Each structure stands twice: as structure tokens, then as C-alpha cells.
Image (cartoon, rainbow, N blue to C red):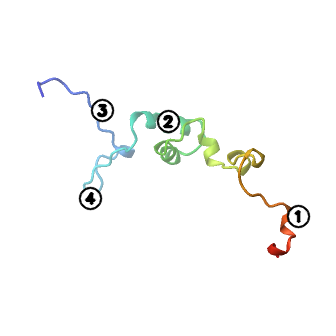
Amino acid sequence: MWGFAESREPARHFLDVARSVTGREWRSRLDARSEAVAIAIAQRGIAAESVARVLAARGVGVDDAAAFLTPSLRRDLPDPSSLTEGVFATPEDLDTPHHK
């Protein structure tokens, strides 16, 4: 605007490819922070770089990446006894005539 240098990030090309065969520019969709998270996930051996980039783009952090890739009902769902409301069927309830 007044001739001052603007602070812009240098163009980051995805996989070091400036342009595809059709002439389209390949740009990384990750910002600098997400790029760093993806690199950290890949360097720790949690996932391949391509998977790490997808995880970082979805907001999965380095500490949560391993758990995200190996879901577990026991770890991810709440303890049923902690639920305060709801209808729970017991084996005795299932023996009633209206359930047969």
C-alpha cells in the first residue's frame, strides 16, 4: 500500500511440485502449525507422512494421533454406570412377554 514490505509466507508447493501437467499449481493446504504437527506425527513413527498430514488437517494433535488411529470402545465410550438418564435393559427385562 505505501511501499512497505508485506509479511507473506513464501509459496509452499505440495510435494515440491510447482505445477502439474495440466498447469495447476500444487499448494499445501496446511498452515505452518499444522505442517509442524504433521511432521512430528510422522517423525515419531505414529503414521506415514501422508496420513499424518490428513490427521493434522483434521485437527488431531501429536499426543492424540495414536489413539485416533486405534479406536477402542472401552477407552472412547463413557462408563455406562456414569450415565444418569436412559433406559437400560437387563436380562430379566428381556424375558418379559412383550419382548418375545
Residue 20: percent from the left, percent from the top?
30, 54
State which quarter of the image contains the C terminus.
bottom right
Tell me the element at label 3: loop
The label nearer to you, 2 versus 1, is 1
Tell me the element at label 2: helix
Q: Which of the 4 quarters of the picture holds residue 47?
A: top right
| Residue sitting farthest toward the left | 2
Q: Is residue 92 shown left or right of residue 35?
A: right
The label nearer to you, 4 versus 3, is 3
Q: Nearer the viewer, residue 94 or 28?
A: 94
Who's the residue at 71% across and 45% down the image? 75
The residue indicated by pointer 2 is 37
Mark 2 and mark 1: span between their CA atoms? 51 Å
Q: Nearer the viewer, residue 94 or 36?
A: 94
The residue indicated by pointer 3 is 9
The label nearer to you, 2 versus 4, is 2
Query: Which is more N-terminal, label 1 or label 2?
Result: 2
The residue indicated by pointer 1 is 92
